[in-house]
Amino acid sequence: MLFSFFFGFGNIIYIGVLLLNAVAILSEDRFLARIGMGRNAYANVDPGFGARQPDTESVKYKLVVLINSTRTVMRAPLIVVNAAIITYLLVAG
Amino acid sequence: MQRQAFPPPNQKSPELFHPRPQHISQVPHLRSPPPPVQPQQQPAVNSYGNPYGSPPIQQGGVDPAYGGNFFGGFMNDPTAQMASQIGKSAMMSGQHYVEQNFSRYVSVSALKHYFNVSNSYVVRKILLVLFPWRHRSWSRQQARLNSAPGSDGPHQQYSHMYLPPRDDINSPDMYIPIMSLITYILLSTVLAGVRGTFKPELLGSITTTSVAVICTEMAILRFAIYLLGITNESQLIDLAAYSGYKFVGVIVTLFLSEVLTGGRGTSNWVGWTVFFYTFLANAFFLLRSLRYVLIPDSSSDPSLRSGVDYTLARSRKSRRVYALAIYAGVFQLVFMFALTREDGIGTNVISKASAP
């Protein structure tokens, strides 16, 4: 019963939009910077003073890049997509 | 300005198979002859078979006996020739652009490689997916191609290329996944028909579910590849192929449990036994096969070979092993479970939806 509702194209679209929303609403000041995954987490490392080069292969670095680029790129399209889905659900659902 | 240089229609009768009379008639109409016209027209007047005189016919593509008559020598006008040349080159470049972009996303020659199968390969591969326990060597064989045949000596360029599935049983193919996907869809609907719960919507819903399973799996794999920083060439098609092999196990589960229990489905001990066997076989097959796709051996990994950050590379490798184990164990279990439960659930949902 669970799976046939989980796997389906409409549900996959819903899941994708909800996950994107979940990434996009993360607050930069209150949450991301506090746990050290903000935009400037890897920006202020000066390699000239003995600081280690950031490990660009690590999972955390890639997560930070992915979260920040998702927040930057998907903010404007998500407004449109959310508005369309809300309108559709109000009319048809 | 150049437009005024057109001769009025039907002014000349171009009975000749050569644009010479019209060129001559154009020249007095020009108020100021453009410079490129002059060297083109001189040879046309001089010699009949001169290559400089023939381009108006070939490039325009219009027989001068007809085109010159109807369009008033339009195609022979140098401006029109240039326009048609520009248009042709623009269209060709557009076509080239489309081909380039299409082949960037879906490489046709790479796809042909995945369908280069033979009968014996298909049989052996299906047996390998179902009974992977005794198979010894799992690495794909490579053919050595001499890419620069003219050069010899130490500077000879060799390019390694994987053998097609016809010659290598360990190579992934796309034939078995696609055929087993279609077979799975048809088998599920046939089983529903045997139970008397067939609806035409069942075909669509099962197709949607199985394609959505594949899409979800591809998305998860793509995300994991990004996080783990795995770089390998032509990898996503390989992963799609490997993820499609589980349909073989799903088909065997559905069919055997249906036959052995006399039509009571997969929710009994026979069904569960067959399901767990095919799941374990598929997981073992994926673990052994994907090792060579996802986890580079230490001799080819540059960071391991150079000795820099050895512990870092070791931890990265163990992380990949864990990710592969989770993928082959947990995710395959969930997906195969969803696929084997699909027929009963789908009929329940549809009969429930169509009941009122």
Image: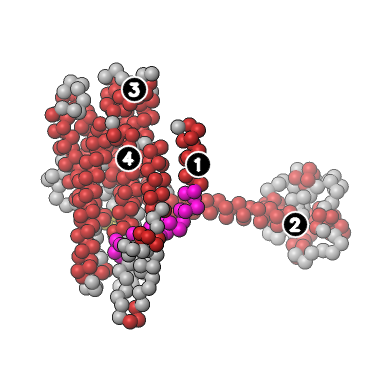
Residue type of the residue flagged with mark 4: Val
Single out the mark in the foreground, 4 or 2. Answer: 4
* Badge 1: residue crowd in 10 Å (few <14, some 14–19, many ≥20): few
Q: Are marks 4 and 3 on the same chain?
A: yes
Between the C-alphas of marks 1 and 2, the distance is 51 Å
The numbered mark 2 sits on a residue in which chain? B
Q: Is residue B169 found left or right of A87 in the rendered image?
A: left
Single out the mark in the foreground, 2 or 3. Answer: 3
* 4 or 2: tag closer to the N-terminus: 2
The numbered disc on residue B79 is 2
Q: Are marks 3 and 1 in contact (CB under 8 Å)?
A: no
Q: Indicate yes or no whether the magenta region holds residue A61.
A: yes
Q: Indicate yes or no whether the magenta region holds residue B66.
A: no
Q: Are marks 3 and 1 on the same chain?
A: no
The numbered mark 3 sits on a residue in which chain? B
Please name the residue shown 41% across and 49% down the image.
Answer: A21
The numbered disc on residue B352 is 3
Q: Nearer the viewer, residue B245 or A54?
A: A54
Residue A66 position, x and y percent, is: 38, 58
Query: Which residue position is annotated with label 4?
Result: B213
Residue type of the residue flagged with mark 3: Lys
In which image quadrant can residue B93 be found? bottom right
* Badge 2: residue crowd in 10 Å (few <14, some 14–19, many ≥20): some
Residue B67 position, x and y percent, is: 75, 45
